[in-house]
């Protein structure tokens, strides 16, 4: 799989992950093994290119492990159910050499907690924080946290360099920090998400909200990137810092 390049995000040192989930195979008696051909259709063992093992846990949840016929891991995913598939718990994805490229968690099908995405250019892992994104996704409260919110002011907020309006800098920030969610990649989902947010008098971003939603994972990622925006230079009206509302389209296109 191809993982989009992600730059300028909080870095952490190269993590060492063990394939602990493979040990579940020896611990569970309720395991279904499926042999798959090169287009992931069931086949006989002697013709198989891939193996899938569905393991039912004691709590009636599942772990699905996909690997090559040579036991090189492809993915390890926890599910609340597999009919229908509802991701719940840890997931991991690997490249063709068995190196982990993605590690994250789902809560009842929603991206949650901290995800780690391998950045091959810098040989380390970027972090994506989805804590609190579900609340932003579900929040329909339109009550503003400021007594006045403007759409146009004498001095509009600026992102980045003071001498510029900051629009291009903000687009660059978004494009460099946007990660294409793995489920949307696998299902070849594209879309345009419109995010409304407020740049407060203190330069912080407040109340990111999807006013036009698309795929849930794409919407989660758009909300995350806007929420995690660095400080802006606040807008001014009559020489006073004020809150200014923006609406921005974020476009996801697969290469």
Image (spheres, grey):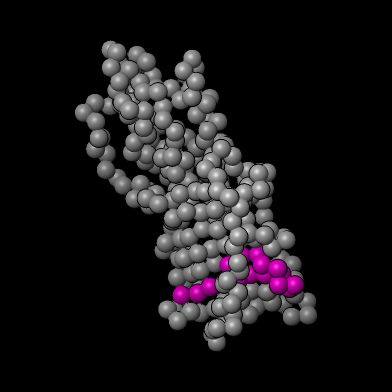
Q: Position of residue 149 (x, y in %)?
A: 28, 27
Q: Is residue 150 above or below residue 219?
A: above
Q: Position of residue 93 (x, y in %)?
A: 61, 60
Q: Position of residue 98 (x, y in %)?
A: 69, 63
Q: Nearer the viewer, residue 97 or 172?
A: 97
Asked if the magenta segment contains residue 73, the reply would be yes
Q: Nearer the viewer, residue 116 or 208?
A: 116
The image quadrant where one finds the N terminus is bottom right
Residue at the far left: name it.
Answer: 147
User: In screen coordinates, is 177 left or right of 58?
Assistant: right
- Residue at x 64% of width, y 74% of height: 52
Q: Position of residue 199 (x, y in %)?
A: 36, 29
What is the magenta segment's predominant secondary structure?
A: strand
Q: Is residue 135 above or below residue 239?
A: below
> Which residue range is magenta in the image?
61-76
- Residue at x 44% of width, y 51% of height: 130
Residue at the far front: name it.
Answer: 13
Q: Is residue 50 visible?
A: no
Asked if the magenta segment contains residue 214, the reply would be no
- Residue at x 78% of width, y 76% of height: 47
Q: Is residue 205 above or below residue 43?
A: above
- Residue at x 68% of width, y 43% of height: 121
Q: Quadrant of residue 140?
A: top left
């Amino acid at each position: 799989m191809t993982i989009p390049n992600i730059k300028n995000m909080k870095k952490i040192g190269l993590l060492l992950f063990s394939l602990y989930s493979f040990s579940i195979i020896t611990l569970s008696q309720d395991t279904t093994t499926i042999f798959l051909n090169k287009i992931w259709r069931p086949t006989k063992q002697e013709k198989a290119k891939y193996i899938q093992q569905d393991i039912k846990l004691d709590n009636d949840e599942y772990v699905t492990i996909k690997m090559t016929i040579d036991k090189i891991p492809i993915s390890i995913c926890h599910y609340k159910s597999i009919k229908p598939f509802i991701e719940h718990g840890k997931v991991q994805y690997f490249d063709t050499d068995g190196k982990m490229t993605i590690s994250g968690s789902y809560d009842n099908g929603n991206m949650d907690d901290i995800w780690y995405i391998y950045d091959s250019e810098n040989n380390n892992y970027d972090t994506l924080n989805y804590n609190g994104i579900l609340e932003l996704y579900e929040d329909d409260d339109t009550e503003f946290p400021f007594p006045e919110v403007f759409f146009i002011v004498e001095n509009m907020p600026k992102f980045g360099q003071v001498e510029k309006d900051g629009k291009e800098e903000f687009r660059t920030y978004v494009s460099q920090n946007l990660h294409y969610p793995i489920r949307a990649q696998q299902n070849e989902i594209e879309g345009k998400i419109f995010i409304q947010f407020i740049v407060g008098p203190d330069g912080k971003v407040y109340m990111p909200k999807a006013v036009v939603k698309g795929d849930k994972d794409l919407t989660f990622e758009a909300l995350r990137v806007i929420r995690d925006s660095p400080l802006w230079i606040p807008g001014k009206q009559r020489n006073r810092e004020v809150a200014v509302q923006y609406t921005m389209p974020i476009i996801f296109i697969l290469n």
